[in-house]
Amino acid sequence: MAGPRYSFSAAAGPLPAAVAATVAEACLDWQGSGSILGLSFVCERFKALQRETEIALRRLLAVPQGFRVLFLSGGATAQFAALPFNLLAGGRAVYLDTGHWSRRARDEAARHGPVLTLPVAGLAAYDGWLGEEAPAYCHLTSNETADGVQWAEVPALPVPLAVDMTSDFLTRPIDFDRVALAYAGTQKSIGVPGLTVVILREDLLGRAAPTTPRVLDYGVQAAADSRVNTPPVFAIFVLHAMLGWIEAQGGVAAMAAAARRRSTAVYWAVDENPAYRAWVPPDLRSRINPCFRLADEAATAAFLAAAQAEGLHDLKGHPDVGGVRVSLYNGLSDDAVAALVGFLGAYAAIGLAA
Ligand code: PMP
């Protein structure tokens, strides 16, 4: 009999079995009112669901008064454009360059206004934060999904900081004294594709350029309760179910502890075996997307095939980076991590003996 099948995909995370069961049931019937798949976004039942989802999110992340929560579509990629439309206000932006996704965000912003790219090493020395040259905002990617690099904590900056948290949202607390705007697609650690959560300081509303598409305009969306057009109803339902699950596990602190425990086990298995090389310096290592290479890089395809034969799927590194990438999103089971860690040890032992 074939064993369990585990996916370590970076693109989308698994839902815990209990959440998947809740969702499956609601697809047939939700609380006696028919399938969730046909729920109208203008009915009171949906509005109540959206309100409850926002309340749960605020509770889990301790979102302070003075911040608004938006439920949008278009993915994090739409937010790459929304940021300059809403926040540039004739000024310029600073983008901290940490890897693939911070560059993608920067490249989109650069189509809409003046953007300065800063390496992280240049952060402290940068003298344009204050005065006439002060940027309208600064952007960073809290976890680089492709490169396996994560900010241990975000910096305190004297300008509004916008943070792409697509791959580590709700895997650790957010310091809202430092973060003026956080955004994240929900498909990795908190649900399914189609929904992007934006949490932003109220004073950032109403600054949008006149040409801003209405669906991307934070002020317009906030005034319409994120219902300028049809919101992703199903994805909001799944988020609601996922937030309930996270709360039952012990909240964001429990997710952070799991990420720490699981990533430590993976890095340990990698570091202790000369068959593998993790190239990210320890203080920058992602707790969500650990990346490594085989010492013999030519053996990568054989390694991935052997993993797959053991039911361990989607471990191939990002095409721009290569190597191996493990994704440890909230919904992944501990069994999956244990199976992977066991495989890493066994493969290294066989590889070295051969
Ligand atoms: N930012 C980060 C950090 C990501 O990992 C991704 C997707 N992998 C995106 C942005 C883009 O998200 P989407 O495809 O939902 O637009």
Image (cartoon, grey):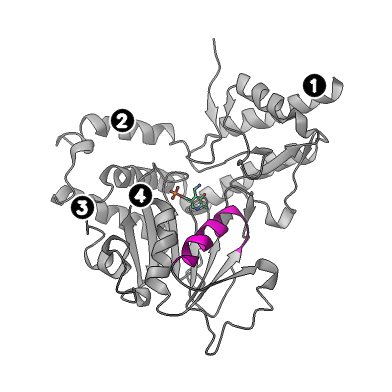
Mark 3 and mark 1: Cα distance apart in space: 56 Å
Q: Residue furthest bottom?
A: 131
Q: Which residue matches tag 4?
A: 195
For the C terminus, the image quarter is top right
| Position of 312 relative to 51 (above/below) | above
Mark 2 and mark 1: Cα distance apart in space: 41 Å
> Looking at the image, can residue 45 be seen?
yes
The part of the image, by quadrant, that contains residue 71 is bottom left
Q: Which residue matches tag 3?
A: 48
Kind of element beneath mark 4 = loop
Is 98 within the magenta?
A: yes
Mark 3 vs ligand 1: CB below 8 Å: no
Q: Position of residue 77 (x, y in %)?
A: 43, 54
Query: Which residues, given as a range, are shown in magenta?
Result: 97-111
The part of the image, by quadrant, that contains residue 225 is bottom left
Label 3 close to label 2 by CB (< 8 Å): no
| Position of 218 relative to 329 (above/below) | below
Q: Which residue matches tag 1?
A: 350
Is 184 within the magenta?
A: no
| Position of 201 relative to 143 (above/below) | below
* Dot 3 alpha-carbon crowd within 10 angstroms: few under 14, some 14 to 19, many 20 or more: few
Q: If you read the primary sequence from the N terminus, does the residue marked by circle 2 or circle 4 appear first? A: 2
Of the pair 88 and 334, the residue shown nearer to us: 88
Of the pair 188 and 299, the residue shown nearer to us: 299
Q: Which residue matches tag 2?
A: 24
Label 3 close to label 1 by CB (< 8 Å): no
Amino acid type of the residue that numbered disc 2 sits on in the rendered structure: Ala
Mark 4 and mark 3: Cα distance apart in space: 17 Å
Q: Residue furthest top?
A: 1
